[in-house]
Image: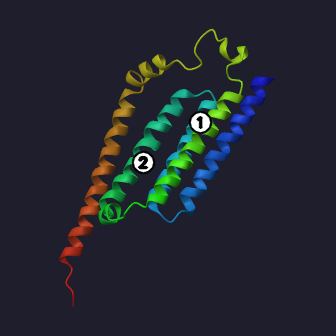
């Protein structure tokens, strides 16, 4: 009964995180914050896969979507808006507010973990690990190897295409004549 309630609470928490970060990704005006919201939302989807007892799909979600798409968006932002990234001066109040927010967040997470009862005997008596990471690694290298190689080639082609599109815009802007 305790595990069932815990799974429901975990599902609700992951749902709130996923939907909330997706709303942030859609509604924010800054592309960087949108990319961060998108990455967190995709991590939430990986959490759903873990709740459904599908660790391979969760790792695939994290590898493909969170890492590759988020990195691609960050590199695109860095290539397009280089002066805006390096010309902003840091305000001491913003830095202090960020540190305070970090400490509050870490304190809240720590309090949640300490009061959750995860060190209860019900949760610590397992005959085998819940997720067999070695078996997932073996399947990724053997059975799913060609698919992952094809996926890597596709992602590399998309990064090269994004770089080519960013470069073409710069060349076209240089070659335009001012009348």
Badge 2 element? helix
Name the disc covering residue 69, or none: 2
**Residue 137 placement: quadrant:** top left
Residue 48 appears in the rendering: no
Q: Residues within 10 Å of mark 2 (few under 14, many from 20)?
A: some
Q: Give the vertical position of 11 relative to 137 (above or below).
A: below
* In-image side of 109 versus 31 (left or right): right
**Rendered location of residue 160, percent (x, y):** 27, 51
Which label sits on residue 47? 1
Q: Position of residue 53 (x, y in %)?
A: 62, 27
Per the model, the C-alpha gap separating discs 2 and 1 is: 17 Å
Side of 121 where 28 appears, left or right: left
Circle 1 — which element? helix
Mark 2 and mark 1 lie on one chain; the one further toward the N terminus is: 1
39 lies above or below 55: below
Viewer-side residue, 106 vs 55: 106
Image disc number at residue 34: none
Above or below residue 107? Residue 162 is below
**Res 41 visible:** yes
Query: Extreme top residue here?
Result: 127
Number of callouts in the render? 2
Who is closer to the viewer here, 25 or 108?
108
Based on the displayed image, in which of its 4 quarters is residue 149 positioned?
top left
Q: Residue 100 or 77: which is nearer the viewer?
A: 100
Q: Residue furthest right?
A: 1
């Amino acid at each position: 009964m305790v595990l069932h309630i815990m799974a429901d609470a975990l599902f609700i928490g992951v749902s709130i995180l996923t939907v909330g970060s997706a709303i942030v990704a859609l509604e924010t005006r800054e592309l960087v914050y949108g990319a961060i919201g998108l990455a967190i939302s995709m991590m939430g989807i990986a959490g759903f896969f873990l709740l459904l007892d599908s660790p391979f799909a969760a790792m695939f979600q994290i590898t493909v979507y969170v890492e590759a798409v988020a990195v691609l968006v960050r590199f695109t932002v860095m290539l397009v808006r280089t002066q805006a990234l390096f010309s902003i001066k840091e305000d001491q109040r913003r830095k202090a507010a960020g540190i305070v927010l970090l400490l509050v967040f870490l304190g809240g997470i720590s309090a949640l973990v300490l009061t959750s009862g995860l060190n209860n005997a019900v949760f610590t008596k397992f005959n085998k690990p819940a997720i067999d990471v070695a078996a997932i690694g073996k399947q990724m290298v053997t059975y799913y190897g060609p698919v992952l190689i094809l996926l890597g080639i596709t992602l590399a082609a998309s990064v090269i295409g994004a770089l080519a599109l960013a470069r073409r815009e710069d060349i076209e802007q240089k070659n335009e004549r001012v009348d």
